[in-house]
Amino acid sequence: MRMLLFGSNMAVPSSSSSSRCVLTRVLSRLQGAGLNNQQVVCGESLLVLSVDRYIRDTGSALYFPHTVHRGDDLYDVTVTDGDCRLRVTLDPSLNRLVERNVLSCGTATVNAALCRAMSGYVLVTMEIADGDTHLTQTDTHSLPWCTHTQPGPLMPLTANRSSYLPLWNNVDYSGESWRHDTPPGGEEETLQGVSPGVTVAELQRSFIGQRDFARGTVQRHMIVRIINKSHLVHYGKAEQNCECPYKGVLEVCDHTARVCVVLWNSVCTRWFSAVRPGMMLRLSHYRVKPCYMQPEHSIVVWLRKTMLETYYGATVLKRTQRDIHFLFHSSQLLSCPHGNQCDVIGLLTFVGRAERIRGKGSDMLEYRWLRLEDGTSDQPITVKLFATSQPETHRKLRPLSVVVCTRLKVVRSSSWRPGCFYLTNNENTQVYTTGQHSEMPYRKLRPIKPFLQWVKGLDDRQVMSRALIGGFFVYPPPPVSLEAHVKEGAPELLGGAELQRRVESLRYRERDSFCIQATVTMVTHCHRGQEDQCLVWTDRQASHLGSPTSSATQMSPRPQHARTSFTSPKRKLSTRTETPRKRLPLATLQGDQHSDRGVLWDASMEFLESSAHHDEDEDEDDEDEDDDTWSFVTAVAPPLVRPVAMETLPLRYSHAQGEELAGAAMALQPGEWAGLRRHHHALLERFDPAVTSWYTLTLKVLSDSVVIETVFLPHSPPLPIPLPPHNNTWLSILSHGAFSPDTPPPSPADLIGMATQLANQRLVCVLEACHLGGARTEIVLTRAYSL
């Protein structure tokens, strides 16, 4: 196994300049303790600069034999005391803190206990401090390390892996090892006059019918164009010792045929982020093997240790294969059958928050909802966009951008609405947004011109009025009848205790659907910023039956607290709570109303200009750590209205604020997370909320009388699809999930007055739960069907 960065034989600095460094003093004490599991507590505040994830290997059990069954993930944490930096491994018993985003970049800790191990140093226990810390310097990336050896590219400490994984999915790339070289060439005449040593068809004929496919390395170079690029595949397993377990698949062609090219291991980390559809490749020193991935190809080209050169814009090949499929309009998609593949272009008007669902095994799949408009129909293009191994592009997605999505597939279900469909990824999906169009070949496709004319004719203010970011969003929406919901495969009915267990097992941003049978015991209407003036209806009889004096099982809330103490792995965690602070109302944006004019014109000009206009990155919405959404309550008491989470309600997008947010992210250095985090929250709170009020329904589960507090949003934009009209009674509103579209909605006072309709009603309730970080879990009631 390779030499680890902070091994037990590493000495710590002894100069007088390091005597004031808290971490240096702690490491000196650990050096004297030896490898006897003795812990040394750092009483000073430490700041978490980064949290990096990777997969165990077979040797990792030697470091943590007592936690071998706690999952495959390990985490390295970089901390600072303000004078120097130290990288340590998080004890796997604390992995849950990262999985629920309690411990993250920017977290302040106190009383951190460290011990020595064969791999270096292990962070065993800590206390998470709430609020700002005195460590406020922003130039943390230039701080010295607590050892004499200056690290090169940061690699995992307790597993023989060459790079880290992203925290929230396995599809994107992460870390310094993925920094690729700038592709050579780029001029049209770069490859003029260069003849390939072998064509794809010649290569296929040479190997078809022969048994020995792995007979050596092919020296003759081949010139091909990329027509498809798959997402990144990480195939690392805890029981395997592959140092660089990555694979990327390219579908390439020349004028004779198509073939799959596979980038393996270190070749993948070097070149995957550098290549893209439309590029030319010159390949040599590769192997040819039978193709089992795609039936239409007889061979596959393996690149392990190879010579690979990229050229963008070279015209040496005849374009017998299209770089992009025909661009579909939203009007054409209405009749597209299920499973069809298509490419779309549109103006982005809604960017949902990042969420996750469980994939195969323990993998988490990250996605967000997008809505695009192209002017050809009233129905927008709805896209469930999973990670495409383009993390930089996904961070730039924001309203008023022109977005092109390729290789999407149409998803239709046996929905109660025949026109209800959406688009989602396949393995070759690529996304391009403002700042990337000028160099792409699709700029000259025929459907682009009418789309650009439509964009230029739009009124910026009208588009801004429907431009939204974040918020709760469900699609396809559940049916309006229980029979249709059961027919479509409703989740199994759960008891209250099982629901609590499932909700508490959710990881950060993980979302899941649940069904329960319950009655409504309380309805509350609240307006943002006026939580002390809410309207309340209470079913007194149900409240009495659910009181603490009864034998009913109750769920206790876990309030957000000032400090959470995490003890050693053999002990239970203890908490100290304070009275929750009220959330201040969001401040409305008072900027210049003319600041958003011309945005759509600028977005369309990129397709006409030859040079790219690079927009600045926009960081993903971060969690609001002052929010306090308790989902489970112990009894019906005088109402204590808790503010709804910022992530639950959609915000109206402002281009000026969005540009300021992106500019702040670009201006800061990598280590300046503290200023970015505070600025990010300040800017988000200046967006106008699209929904200013909400309903809270308190449900009592029929099976075990557990009481659950849920959020209900009957008028939350964007509405997924047009709804049929109904009579706006409570039961019809709950079964449709919204007010009737053809009549004015009842006022909150009238609706609360009508809540007696819910007394003693047995309902099948459809819930959507999403963990928002820390102790905050959002539970939204999307449908309730009367029995």
Image (cartoon, rainbow, N blue to C red):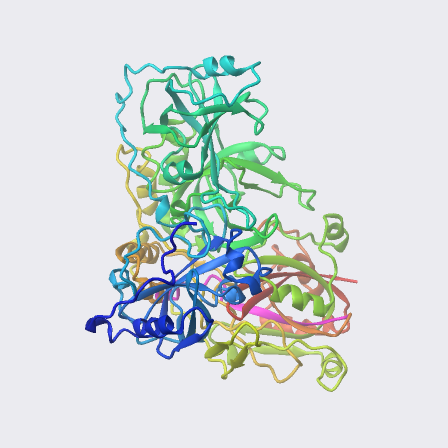
- What residue is drawn where x is 24% and y is 61%? 142
Q: Nearer the viewer, residue 219 or 348?
A: 219
Up the image or down, 669 lies above or below 598; here it is: below
Q: Is residue 540 left or right of residue 403?
A: right
* Magenta-colored stretch includes residue 525: no
Q: Which residues are magenta?
A: 681-702
Residue 217 rendering spot, x and y as whole percentages: 43, 23
Question: Which quadrant of the structure image shows residue 145?
Answer: bottom left
Residue 723 rendering spot, x and y as whole percentages: 63, 51
Q: Quadrant of the C terminus?
A: bottom right
Seen from this angle, which residue lies furthest right? 787
Can residue 719 be seen by looking at this rendering? no
Q: Nearer the viewer, residue 223 or 386?
A: 223
Q: Is residue 94 left or right of residue 639?
A: left
Q: Is residue 518 left or right of residue 771?
A: right
* Magenta-colored stretch includes residue 699: yes
Up the image or down, 525 lies above or below 325; here it is: below
Q: Nearer the viewer, residue 435 or 740?
A: 435
Up the image or down, 461 lies above or below 458; here it is: below
Residue 259 rendering spot, x and y as whole percentages: 48, 23
